[in-house]
Amino acid sequence: MNKNFVSAVGVTMLAGTFLLVSHATATEEYDVKAFGPKSPIVWQKPVKVVFEHRVHTDDIGLECGACHGELFAMQRGVAPRTGKLSMASLAEGQFCGACHDGETAFASDTNCIACHVVPEDPIVWTKPVKAVVFYHQVHTEEYGLDCDSCHNDAFAMKKGAAENSSNFTMKALYDGQYCGKCHDGETAFASNTLCNTCHIGVKGYNRMTGADPHADEQSGH
Amino acid sequence: MANNSITTIFAQTQDTRLATPGMNRATIFFLITIVAGLSCGVASFFFGHEAIYNNTREVPWGMLISTYAFWAITSTGLCIYAAISHLFGGTRMAIVSNRMVWMSIVCILAAFATIGVEIASPHRMIIYNILSPNPTSNIWWMGTLYGLAVGCMIVEFFGIITGLARIAVILGTAGAVAEVLANSCLGGVFATLPGRPYWYGGQLPIYFLTAAFLSGAAATVLFNHLAYKIRGEEMSEAVKLGVKSAGKAMTLVLVLYSVATFWRLIMYYVGGAELGRIAAGALITGPLSVNFWVLEVCVGLIIPLLLIILSRLENVGMMALAGLLILVGQFVARYDLIAAGLLVPASLGWDNVPTYLDYVPSIFEFGVIIGSISVVAFGFLMGERVFGKVFDQKEHH
Amino acid sequence: MNIKDLEKEENEGIDTLPSEERRKFLKMGLAVTGVFLGGSVLSLTAVKSARAVDSVIPAEGQYPYSKHYGMIMRQNNCVDCEKCLDACRETNHVPVGHGAWRTTIQERLTTVDDVEQREFRPILCNHCNRPPCVRVCPTKATYKDPETGIVVMDYKKCIGCKTCMAACPYNARYFNHDKYAIDKCNFCIDTRLAQGKKDTACVAVCPAKVRIFGDIKDKSTEIYQLLHEPDNKIWVLRPETGALPNVFYMNA
């Protein structure tokens, strides 16, 4: 009985220690050269942004105090939680914008994909009609477009902005808005042709989202 | 004699040799399976036809329709042979013709029972078949003519049991004509649908009539053999000769039917509509190929032919077995014919539809089939018991 | 004039004759042979099946109905947004389940030069001039509306034999488990046309103007103009069945 108790406590403590250690290594592995976390810091809010700590410390040679303190708290996740992290605040010299002003470092309204990532998953609009697909990668990689080819002229950066606007229609496209900015028959195929290149329909949408198209349509039994 | 009361008629027609416990048990057994089987069909009126049968929008017909066609076709065959015998009294089959008339009635009732639970609103049929007939509809003619035929045959049968030979011959002939026309319209139901290339064409009604001659002869041999089997008696020479004649007819039509089947399928592979070819492919290599090659061709055509050859048209028991196998083959052949025509999707090439749609009869559909087979078995036993003496003629005319 | 000279003459053919001329000629011939009754029966059937031999479009002046409703699909405009399906279901109370629909959109995916291509095709009842479903119905529960040529249902007469479903080359019919009768598209004859509306629910809602509905006899209608525009290549589905459908297809 006594033996059992000891071994039970021993196993529990051992497991606890192991869990703690493994948890720490997974999230906060310290890199001496980076003077910070080994893996890049990834903010999910307001949009996905990747920050390489090491580039700013080891490569460029900034001191901790250059950013930590006034601009960014040491503690992880404070900046996104402030709700003030936006391209607008950067332009006003806050957060990254303190250096990324075009003089000290490249301006925050240029070189977007240095920090932002091109979405891998296709965008599927379901309004005003179901459903239209857009592949970022086709436009950036195959046709070599930059972010500012479309943003913010044809499309606002903000997700769902076009979809929720009342004039996201084919007519607007024919007038040179949205996709129609390039899809005019000269720069790219005209938006009143090849409809089903982008329009994947309800069937395509269901296939893409894995929805069962016949869930409420069961034929027979 | 015609003025005798019903009890005296039955006293004269019933076969007391069959009043045995074994017969009673068998009769009651089939009565129970009729109730159980047809209950599966009647359930459709409570739970919805669409809910308990596996038919869909794309495959609106299935095993119930094919079984209806099978019994209707068998009924036609039996009726034709009986009428020919009655009309031309000299044929050897005349001696067993009364039994054939009875079985023809029984088979058509089995057919009616099957289709009665297949169509969604039979009560509307009774009203609007009369109030709103459509003369261009094969279904209307088929239903009306089969109804007429069964009416004629029941009166004919009444004539037989009461000894009114004249009424029997006249109505027997009328009934047979109605049956042949009804059978032809049944073939026409399928043959006149250009949207279903596998069915479309002038061959099908003739094919159905050939099938009627085949099934009718097979049923004649089988039921006569069984009639003597249940009595534990030997056939008289005259009856034996009659059954052998039916066996000869069965052999002849078996060959004709095989030829018709062969050319019918070959035709789809030399050109014509793609949907017809794909439907034929369902039988040759597709989802119905086991049905076709094993049951239709081997069990239903080749083995019976071998059995007939082995029997040298002498061994009635062997011919009866051949008859049973032919009926099994014919049952499957009707199913394959209906299924192949419907399994081919009209939207082939679109919506990623499979080459062959999926249809497997539901447990309820199988229930109805068992019920309809029981109707025939029950009818056969009851016929032998109640009218046996009329069937077991020593001489005719 | 000998045969060789005759051969050199250009054959004006009956196809090029105006129908008035043809009719006159026929009348004369029939009067001569004294089979006028036979002739009128013949011409009656000829009107119902009126199509030029090499065209799917009804021949001029030979429409059997006072209004001859039809629809043309500008197929490549369809993007499968399926607003028409929802509008139809709502307008005509089409139940959900058991394969019940009056109109649907089919999809075909093909790969051409490693590029995946998709096509959408709306389908519905073709309201044929020679409708197989109407011919086979035992109780006249389905019939051509004598005014408009629309194939309609008289639900109370439907016995549910499903022969019309087997007969239809277009899979346009379904078993309506609410009505316990066969049901189908009727160009919204009861739900919209009866209220004076000029189009069907699916047409009204289509954002891409895929579906054009109207009287194909009336020269002022858009459908008439589309059908008779020489540059338009018009086709119908399953012409080989001889059903003479009134739903046409073209690419815009």
Image: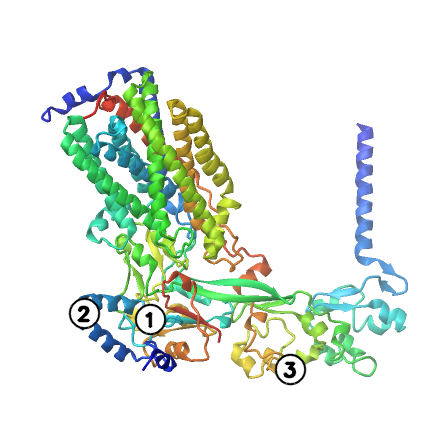
Residue of label 1: C69
* Cα–Cα span, label 2 and label 1: 37 Å
Contact between marks 1 and 3 (CB within 8 A): the answer is no
Quarter of the N terminus of chain A within the rendering: top right
Q: Earlier along the polypeptide chain: callout 2 or callout 1?
A: 2
Residue at the extreme front: C2
Under mark 2, the amino acid is Thr
Return the chain for callout 2. Answer: C
* Cα–Cα span, label 2 and label 3: 71 Å
Residue B113 visible in this rendered orientation of the protein:
no
Return the chain for callout 3. Answer: A
Residue of label 2: C33
Q: Position of residue B361 (x, y in %)?
A: 44, 41
| Mark in the foreground, 2 or 3 | 2
> Is B1 situated left or right of C53 in this image?
left
Residue B89 visible in this rendered orientation of the protein:
yes
